[in-house]
Image (cartoon, rainbow, N blue to C red):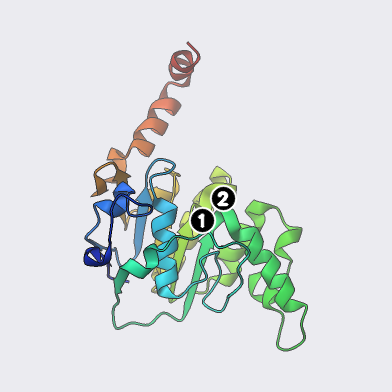
């Protein structure tokens, strides 16, 4: 994916959701990094809404999974995907996945449902042979990264750090780098200053004015975390006062 465009002439009102979100209201076109693009911002800023729409335009199931997943447990995604156009390169990915932290449980359930029917090798074999429901949330996330993602792929990850310890987040950085070296591209929404530290990437910060390309050390996530860890006693004193 090279660039994202909002078809503004098709929008009838920017006062209605999801077009009222600043990230959408101020969107025209947006260039994406060929390796890793991060979207960061406060809760409710529209990160997940934007990623969900990008995933839907690409052909992923809005609840998560690969392009072969077609289940739906609840119709909750917005209509934004109908107003987006993606500019693509001539290179076609051989793999792809949309990880949505809040609905990954549903993906795990769908895998078990599909494997309950005869025909073909079990799908769970591609996820490390162990049921994702028989692992912790973090272990199942990591199994996805280590076993299901095999490179030359296009991966959209919505808050992948949700179930990962700091150590596993650092291991995730290493895995992302391995996959990038194998010609993969990532689009990631995150709150984690560890994950967004990946060096060969573009960070877009979402604010009331829209999207702003921002160096890592100028993000609020980095500055707040650094200030807290450098002087936790002082910060706690301020917070508890």
Q: Are marks 1 and 2 in contact (CB under 8 Å)?
A: yes
Give x and y (percent) for residue 31.
24, 63
Task: Residue under label 2, please give it.
Answer: 168
Q: Residue furthest bottom?
A: 119
Q: Count neighbours of disc 2 (C-alpha within 10 A) and say few if under 14, some if 14 to 19, many if 20 or more.
A: some
Give x and y (percent) for residue 170.
50, 50
Give x and y (percent) for residue 129.
72, 71
Observer-nearest of 158 and 33: 158
Would residue 214 be seen by someone viewing this image from the given angle?
A: no
SS type, badge 2: helix
Q: Is residue 41 above or below residue 74?
A: above
Observer-nearest of 13 and 125: 13
Would you identify the image quadrant in which residue 87 lies? bottom left
Instruction: Tell me the residue at 38%/27% (across/down).
Output: 227
Q: Is residue 189 above or below residue 30?
A: above
Task: Residue under label 1, please give it.
Answer: 172
Would you identify the image quadrant in which residue 218 lies? top left
Observer-nearest of 85 and 146: 85
Tally the numbered discs.
2
Instruction: Tell me the residue at 73%/73% (across/down).
Output: 113
Q: Is residue 95 above or below residue 223?
A: below
Would residue 191 be seen by someone viewing this image from the given angle?
A: yes
SS type, badge 1: helix
């Amino acid at each position: 994916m090279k660039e994202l465009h909002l078809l503004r002439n098709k929008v009838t009102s920017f006062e209605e959701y999801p077009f009222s979100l600043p990230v959408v209201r101020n969107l025209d076109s947006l260039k994406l990094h060929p390796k890793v693009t991060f979207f960061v911002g406060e809760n409710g800023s529209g990160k997940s809404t934007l990623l969900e729409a990008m995933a839907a335009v690409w052909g992923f199931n809005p609840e998560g999974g690969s392009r072969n997943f077609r289940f739906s447990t609840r119709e909750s995604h917005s209509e934004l995907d109908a107003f987006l156009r993606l500019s693509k390169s001539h290179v076609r990915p051989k793999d792809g996945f949309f990880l949505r932290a809040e609905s990954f449980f549903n993906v795990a359930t769908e895998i078990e449902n599909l494997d309950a029917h005869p025909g073909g090798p079990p799908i769970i074999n591609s996820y490390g042979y162990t049921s994702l429901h028989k692992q912790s949330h973090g272990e199942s996330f990591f199994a996805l990264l280590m076993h299901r993602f095999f490179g030359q792929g296009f991966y959209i990850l919505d808050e992948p750090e949700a179930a990962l310890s700091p150590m596993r987040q650092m291991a995730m950085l290493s895995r992302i780098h391995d996959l990038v070296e194998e010609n993969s591209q990532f689009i990631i929404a995150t709150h984690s200053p560890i994950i967004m530290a990946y060096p060969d990437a573009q960070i877009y910060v979402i604010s009331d004015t829209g999207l702003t390309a921002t160096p890592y050390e100028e993000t609020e996530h980095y500055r707040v975390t650094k200030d807290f860890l450098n002087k936790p006693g002082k910060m706690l004193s301020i917070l508890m006062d």
